[in-house]
Amino acid sequence: MKIDVEKLSASLGVPVVPVVAKQHRGLDDLAKAVLDTVASCPLPLGEGLGEGLCAVSPSPLTPLPKGEGNKQTKLIQRYARIERIVSETVETVSEDKQNVSERIDRVVTHKIFGPVILLLVMLLVFQAIFSWASLPMTLIDHVFSALAATIRAHLSAGIFTDLLTDGIIAGVGGVVAFLPQILLLFLFISLLEDSGYMARAAFLMDRLMRAFGLHGKAFVPLLSSFACAVPGIMATRTIENPKDRIATIMIAPFMSCSARLPVYTLIIAAFFSGKTVLGVLSLGAVIILAMYLLGVAVAIIVASILKRTILNAPPPPFVMELPPYRVPDFGNVAHALFTRCSVFLKRAGTVILSISILLWALTAFPRAHVDQAGGTPNASTQIESSFAGRAGRLIEPAIRPLGFDWKIGIGLISSFAARETIISTLSIVYNVGESPDTKSSSLVEALRNARRADGSAIWTPLTGISLMIFFLLACQCMSTVAIVCRETNSWRWPLFMIGYMMILAYVASFVTFQGGRLLGFV
């Protein structure tokens, strides 16, 4: 398209500045226009600014007189003016690109082919994540293991050395090792957004969400929640109806955020690594896709129940633009990846580091009684007698039906501060809880080798699936709870969210584990 900026400015009665923000084009012109407009105000800023700006250039789009026609008539007249201005100021130079986009959309937005293509795209994304992230994850794990070994070799044995190796390095390193997968996930999301395909995904999902009473605008907040529920919940401000907005907030935590990805991949690496579906697709990629789809399905069902009960309200129509397909702006993609990497590493260096130190202290104290020879306490004895071990033992009867033991219970307790901290917790617990001659070199090996007193395996594939289901459905993020409280201006809704998600997670995990046992799975 070709836009006559001067004529558009004259038609609207206000300065018009063409800007392409992603390419930083027109930003200086925009800043100059703002300064020129402010300078022409007859009144200083802060003292009747509104009247001053209105005096700069009265717009010909004056409001219709009150009482003139009904609301529909006013709307028709407004859009008639908009169409007139567009026809006078916008000229279509070439429709080739638009025609190409339309031809592609006939397939990717098709009622049948569209959802199938969307599923295939997501499956390929997860397949690539597993394939490409394997090597860098292994390298990161080896770096942290070598660092811990070096420290142990150069420092004398004691509490301080244990803190550095079993607390800080094992805790933070266990989480940082998943950085390649998280970056690859956001790489693909950024590419799909910049290419224009995400708008088509929103269009496809709107059909499904509308059938369950959800507002079409809920798709963007829910999509943002796949990265983190906090910005997703904040994005619900674009939904005008309060009931629609609260319904979207209540289901946003069901989207599998990046904090859940390390939990999924840990379980898959421990029990489903190297297995394929149809000899081509990685079983791990299929499982993760299933987790994402399950989260969406549960969210839609819960939203449907809420919209038919306590949040009953008809969804308004949804209008959105389908932009033409374009080559992604790799500068913008790189910036998005840098931002996500910075956020993740900052979280690892602050929240996760603090929790790792705290958890190590809870597993290291109080010190177990030494034997008669005056030696150091057995590692298993130490972890059981520690504050963390006592807390795990306390909740073990409640979580045993889910397939969890007291060590997993420690991880569950810590994960309510932040989901991904269960990785650092288990790293600390299993490093402390194993004797030096049998200590596993990685958390994956530790889970595979963990045994009860009778020699039976603590972790099984069924236990892993049960844990994944629990983490998918439970509300285990204090940041999310805090933002829900702020956005709803009440503690009633966040407490309701914590309660119903916890009950749902427990029941689903119970059914998964006990049902699996009845069917003969282990």
Image: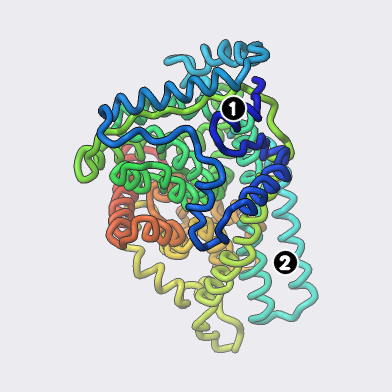
Q: Where the C terminus falls, by quadrant?
A: top left
> Dot 1 lies on which element?
loop
Mark seen at residue 371: none
Mark seen at residue 148: 2
Q: Where is residue 511 in the image (x, y as percent from the top left)?
A: 30, 43
Residue 131's quadrant in the figure?
top right
The answer to whether residue 478 is seen in the rendering is: yes
Give the colour scheme shown: rainbow
Q: What residue type is labelled 2?
A: Ala
Q: Which amino acid does label 1 sit on?
A: Gly
2 displayed left or right of 65: right
337 displayed left or right of 496: right
Residue labelled with disc 1: 196
119 lies above or below 518: above
- Residue at the image position 71 percent from the left and 34 percent from the top: 329
Of 75 and 405, the residue lying toward us: 75
246 displayed left or right of 263: left
Q: Where the N terminus falls, by quadrant?
A: top right
Q: Position of residue 517 (x, y in %)?
A: 34, 42
Q: Position of residue 423 (x, y in %)?
A: 55, 57
Q: Nearer the viewer, mark 2 or mark 1?
A: 1
223 lies above or below 2: below
- Residue at the image position 52 percent from the left and 28 percent from the top: 199
How far apart are labels 2 and 1 at the CA level?
45 Å
- Residue at the image position 55 percent from the left and 35 percent from the top: 13
Looking at the image, tell me whether mark 2 or mark 1 is earlier in sequence order: 2
Residue 319's quadrant in the figure?
top left
> Dot 2 lies on which element?
helix
